[in-house]
Structures are given as structure tokens and as C-alpha cells.
């Protein structure tokens, strides 16, 4: 359950006047393009602090970079080892990430908006969806999706009817946003060359985020969506597209059975788009909740949901395109 101590550790999102990017830093699987957000005059807020002035010619990443890199490398090692040694362990890792992500998101909704999302049916049903997707395929996952949605509706009926529609609507949104999208990772893994498909999915998402951060940090001048994520630039998006298309061509040619390099170009373009939209989508949620991070579990990164923002919407895109290009496997 959500603890009060965690609420104290979850920092409110800095305003643009604080000079800190609203997104993350370059990390394994979660790089960000950076830029200085615009100043505003909302200094009357109690959580406003004077901006720190970085040395001339340098841009601040906004996080503990060594900790972020260390945690990212550690997570990457665990994921790759489980992916190629025992696929069932990787499924368990995905299911655990889903449960923690659900806990973070429902906790923030309760803390910041007073929305009472039923966590128990979401956590049980979400983990079961991931397992069913790997064991029984898409049909099994869809059945668990329907049952979990029904469980959310029934679970909330045990409490007073006030705000019932608000709470169950948020619960169904959470169900689709986290476990439903994560189930496509299990569907990728279920193919004969499943580990290589999942590795391609992870590599392309990491390259997209890292390319956007690197190019945006060095060349970024024009804001992409300043009201949602002031640190993102159009130059960073172009960097993500270019880097991911090259990586996609290499992955399709050398990692995917029957894949062709030109298919990888299309795959990389789609991944850059979905990863960027996923990142912006979670930034929108965090701005609405007025927080900087979804949690504090991962030093230098924030919470699990802060690392799943690009991965979740990218999973169904990669699954669908690989099915179209080389079959279900």
C-alpha cells in the first residue's frame, strides 16, 4: 500500500521558472533532450525557489548522472540476462514492473487528485495479463483484460457511491495505460525469436531517447512542446528519428529472422514517433498532477513509471510492425 513516507519523498514538479528540465537525464533506456525552460512570474508559490545559475556554456541535466547511469546499467544487465537465459524470469520482471508502476500511478492519483483507484484488482489482473499474453497469446490477454476491467468496477462498488464514475474511469485508464500496453512485450517474447524481438524493441527505444537527448542538448534551439515538456526540442526529435532509423535498419538486418534493412527504417521512424509521444503523454500527466517524478524508487531516474513512459506505447507499435514484416513467429 502507499505509505505516507513516500508522499513526503515525491517532489512537486518544478515550475518553468526554476530552470530545471521537467524530464529526465541521459540514462540507459531513458535519455532526454535538454534545454532551458522559459521564465515566468509565478514566484508567489510556496514551493518556488530561485534558479541556480550553471556555469556559462554548460547545460544542467537536472539529476544525479552517475547514479542514473549506474542504475540504468544494472537494470539493463538484469533484463538482458533474464531475457536470454530464462524467458519466464523476464516475464516475471515485466509483471513486477507493471505492479510497481500501477502502485506509483494510483498513489500519485490519490495523493494529488484524491482519486480512489482500486489497486488490488489492477495489480492482480495486470500481472495475470502479462503472463497470459506469454502463455496463451493475444486471446488470453484480452480475456484477462475484460475480467480485470469488470473487477475494477465491482471492487469500487464496495465503497460509497460518491465519485464512483470518476474513480472507475481513472481505473480503466490505468488498466489500459500500464498492463495492457506492457502485455505486448510478452507477445513479442512469445515468438520463436522472441528474445531478439524484445531486444530490438528495447534498443530502438533507448536509441530514440538517447538520440533526442544528445542532439537536443547540443543543437536544440526550437521547442517541440514548451507547455508540456520545455526541455524537448525539434532538433532533438530529428536526432531521435535519424538515430532510430539507422538502428532499426541494423536490428532488422542482423537480429530479426527474415528482416530487411528497409523495414528497419520504417520501424525506427515509428519507434521515434511513439517513444516521443509516450514521453510527452506522461509529461502531461505529471504536469496535471503537479509533480516532477512518479516515484523515488530508482536513484537518478525517479520511479518505474518514469522509465516506462517511452516503452509502454512503443511495445504495441513494434509488435504490430514485426508481425506485418516477418510474421508472428
Image: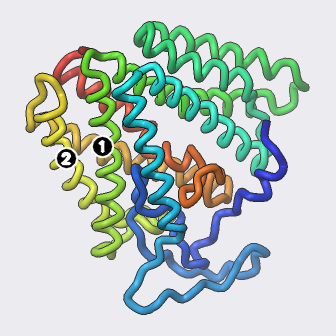
Neighbour class for label 1 at 10 Å: few (<14), some, many (≥20)?
A: some
Q: Which quadrant is the C terminus positioned in?
A: top left
Measuring from the top left, give residue 200's x and y in whole percent. Answer: 27, 36
Q: Secondary structure at mark 1?
A: helix
Left or right of 215 in this view: 71: right
Which mark, by number, is residue 247?
Answer: 2
Q: Are marks 2 and 1 in contact (CB under 8 Å)?
A: yes
Q: Is residue 133 above or below residue 167?
A: above
The structure residue drawn at horizontal position 61% and vertical position 56%, both measured from the top left corner, is 293
Which mark, by number, is residue 203?
Answer: 1
Q: Is residue 37 above or below residue 278?
A: below
The colour mode here is rainbow
Left or right of 183 in this view: 148: right
The structure residue drawn at horizontal position 59% and vertical position 57%, both measured from the top left corner, is 299
The structure residue drawn at horizontal position 25% and vertical position 60%, both measured from the top left corner, is 239
Q: Earlier in the sequence, mark 2 or mark 1?
A: 1
Give me the C-alpha separation between circle 2 and circle 1.
8 Å
Q: Is residue 308 above or below residue 296?
A: above
Measuring from the top left, give residue 273's x and y in whole percent. Answer: 31, 46
Measuring from the top left, give residue 106's x and y in whole percent. Answer: 70, 38
Measuring from the top left, give residue 152's x and y in whole percent. Answer: 71, 20
Q: Nearer the viewer, residue 3 or 275?
A: 3
Question: Residue 251 sits in which quadrant?
Answer: top left
Neighbour class for label 2 at 10 Å: few (<14), some, many (≥20)?
A: many
Q: Nearer the viewer, residue 173 or 191?
A: 191
The structure residue drawn at horizontal position 44% and vertical position 7%, both measured from the top left corner, is 136
Q: Secondary structure at mark 2?
A: helix
Amino acid at each position: 500500500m502507499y505509505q505516507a513516507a513516500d508522499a513526503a519523498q515525491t517532489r512537486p514538479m518544478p515550475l518553468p521558472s526554476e530552470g530545471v528540465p521537467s524530464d529526465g537525464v541521459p540514462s540507459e533506456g531513458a535519455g532526454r533532450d535538454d534545454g532551458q525552460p522559459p521564465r515566468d512570474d509565478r514566484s508567489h508559490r510556496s514551493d518556488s525557489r530561485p534558479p541556480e545559475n550553471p556555469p556559462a556554456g554548460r547545460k544542467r541535466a537536472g539529476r544525479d548522472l552517475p547514479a542514473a547511469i549506474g542504475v540504468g546499467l544494472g537494470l539493463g544487465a538484469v533484463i538482458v540476462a533474464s531475457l536470454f537465459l530464462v524467458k519466464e524470469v523476464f516475464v516475471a520482471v515485466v509483471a513486477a514492473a507493471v505492479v510497481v508502476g500501477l502502485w506509483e500511478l494510483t498513489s500519485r492519483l490519490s495523493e494529488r487528485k484524491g482519486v480512489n483507484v482500486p489497486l488490488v484488482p489492477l495489480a492482480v489482473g495486470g500481472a495475470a495479463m502479462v503472463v497470459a499474453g506469454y502463455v496463451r497469446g493475444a486471446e488470453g490477454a484480452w480475456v484477462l483484460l475484460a475480467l480485470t476491467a469488470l473487477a475494477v468496477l465491482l471492487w469500487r462498488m464496495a465503497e460509497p457511491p460518491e465519485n464512483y464514475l470518476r474513480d472507475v474511469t481513472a481505473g480503466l485508464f490505468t488498466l489500459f495505460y500500464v498492463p495492457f500496453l506492457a502485455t505486448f512485450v510478452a507477445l513479442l517474447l512469445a515468438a520463436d525469436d522472441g528474445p531478439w524481438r524484445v531486444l530490438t524493441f528495447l534498443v530502438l527505444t533507448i536509441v530514440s531517447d538517447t538520440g533526442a537527448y544528445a542532439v537536443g542538448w547540443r543543437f536544440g534551439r526550437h521547442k517541440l512542446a514548451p507547455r508540456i515538456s520545455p526541455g524537448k526540442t525539434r532538433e532533438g526529435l530529428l536526432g531521435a528519428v535519424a538515430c532510430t532509423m539507422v538502428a532499426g535498419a541494423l536490428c532488422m538486418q542482423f537480429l530479426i529472422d527474415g528482416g530487411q534493412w528497409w523495414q528497419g527504417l520504417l520501424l525506427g521512424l515509428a519507434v521515434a514517433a511513439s517513444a516521443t509521444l509516450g514521453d510527452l503523454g506522461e509529461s502531461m500527466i505529471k504536469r496535471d498532477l503537479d509533480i516532477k517524478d512518479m516515484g523515488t524508487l530508482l536513484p537518478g531516474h525517479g520511479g518505474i513509471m518514469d522509465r516506462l513512459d517511452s516503452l509502454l506505447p512503443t511495445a504495441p507499435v513494434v509488435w504490430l510492425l514485426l508481425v506485418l514484416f516477418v510474421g508472428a513467429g
